[in-house]
Amino acid sequence: MSDDFLQSLNHLAMGTRLKRAGVALQSEAQKWLQANGCDIPSAHLPVITALDRMGATSIGVLARMLGIAQPGVSRMVEQLVAGGWVRSETDPKDRRIREIQLTDKGRTFAAEASRSLWPVVEKAVARVCAGLSGPFMSQLTTLENRLATDALEASFRSAQADLEEQR
């Protein structure tokens, strides 16, 4: 029997285990991002990236695009507005709809992040997931075990060094 109770529950606890792995990935990414000058919570970064790629849009479209409940997206947008990263304006045609768009500060950040932050995050997570094989639950266990060590932190260091060397 596994020392990890959730693992012992197999498929019954798969959702909880996936959430736990996601939180671990996001937490390590947040530490690395902060160490590299990014003060935006990592959970908010998909909103900035979506707005950068598609331009101004509504909360509802963002929620559908990201697969996140509308109240959650609204809270993220409020925090991003408070930080000066995005602006929210009422649609003149339909006062119930708020149009969200990046500010100059948000566009500058998105451009810089696309060059220097996102490639490192992408490469680091890909490395920690590399070589997973076999049944999905076995892959999840391997990923959880890697995340329980400093594998992702080391992967961030390595990915950053690789990308700096390429420049």
Image: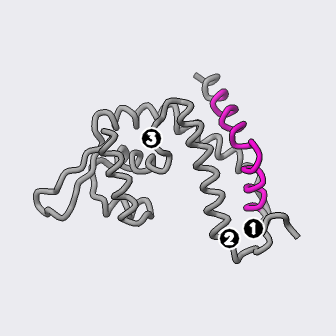
What's the amino acid at mark 1? Met
Q: Which residue is mark 1?
A: 137
Q: Residues within 10 Å of mark 2 (few under 14, many from 20)?
A: some
- Looking at the rendered structure, the secondary structure element under dot 3 is loop
Q: Which quadrant of the structure image shows residue 108?
A: top left
Q: Is residue 131 left or right of residue 18?
A: right
Residue name at image x 65 percent, y 36 percent: 156
Q: Is residue 18 left or right of residue 47?
A: right
- Looking at the rendered structure, the secondary structure element under dot 2 is helix
Q: What type of secondary structure mainly makes up the magenta span?
A: helix
**Image spot of residue 139 (x, y percent):** 75, 61
Q: Which quadrant of the structure image shows residue 122?
A: top right
**Image spot of residue 152 (x, y percent):** 69, 43
What segment carries the magenta color? 139-162
- Which mark lies nearer to you, 1 or 2? 2
- Which mark lies nearer to you, 3 or 1? 3
In this view of the protein, which residue sits in the foreground, 68 or 23?
23
Q: Earlier in the sequence, mark 3 or mark 1?
A: 3
Residue 38 is tagged as none
